[in-house]
Amino acid sequence: MARQKKPHDSFRWFDPSPEVIRLVVMMYVRYPLSLRNVEDLLFERGIDICHETVRLWWNRFGPMFAAEIRRKRVHRMRQFTHWRWHLDEVYVKINGQMRYLWRAVDHEGEVLESYVTERRDKAATLKFIKKAMKRHGRPKAIVTDKLRSYAAVLKEIGAADLQEAGRHLNNRAENSHLPFRRRERAMQRFRRMKTLQKFTSVHASVHNHFAQERHLISRDLYRERRSAALADWRAVMG
């Protein structure tokens, strides 16, 4: 019988403590910093690592942390994500070629799904919507822009009555692209679709975890929620 892998086994071959690795991954994914920016900020804290180590750690541990956050969050948030979805796609240039980043956002700005495709056609739209519904269930309303493939796909899956399309109705999804665009500039764009898909998935989970809607709550409540989010992050992977 195979031995069950424990959470701390993931850190066993790394000299720095898990706390340092979590800090590095959080700084690089959450904030619009380059690899060398993270290296310099850590050096001021007395942590001397190479920028390539930052790259290694986010590539290795970022998806693991994101999966753990998403697993807990999907179970807790599933009852709230059924209300209204906002779907949108944005251009991303990879090696001079245009690719498409699709994003599903709920009514509160929670990023539900990020998906990268080569084309913006009916097949890509269908795969994206099915993937989102498989994980989060069926919403009560779906807000989109006027891309024809949305209407065709929703009609095919029997959800045409859920669609809402208008000029300003989809601002929630449009705004969800802004944090990613800031990170894209700091990273000087992407070179492979696989890397783009990997980073957007990790970035969405980390952004959801730390987003507190500070403009809607009191300062005391914001500090309380921010401390809770940091405590949960430090407990990721045991």
Image (cartoon, rainbow, N blue to C red):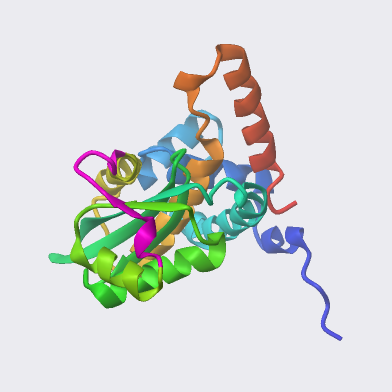
Residue drawn at 62 percent across, 18 percent down: 221
Image x and y of residue 222, in percent:
58, 21
**Left or right: 117 in relation to 136:** left
- State the count of labels: 0
Image x and y of residue 114, in percent:
40, 59
User: Is 218 covered by the magenta stretch?
Assistant: no
Image x and y of residue 102, in percent:
32, 59
**What's the magenta region?**
159-171
Residue 9: image quadrant is bottom right
Residue drawn at 48 percent across, 54 percent down: 202
**Left or right: 165 in relation to 38:** left
Direction bottom: furthest residue: 1
- Looking at the image, residue 26 lies above or below residue 146: above
Direction front: furthest residue: 161
**Relative to the observer, which residue lies in front, 238 or 138?**
138
Image x and y of residue 77, in percent:
61, 47
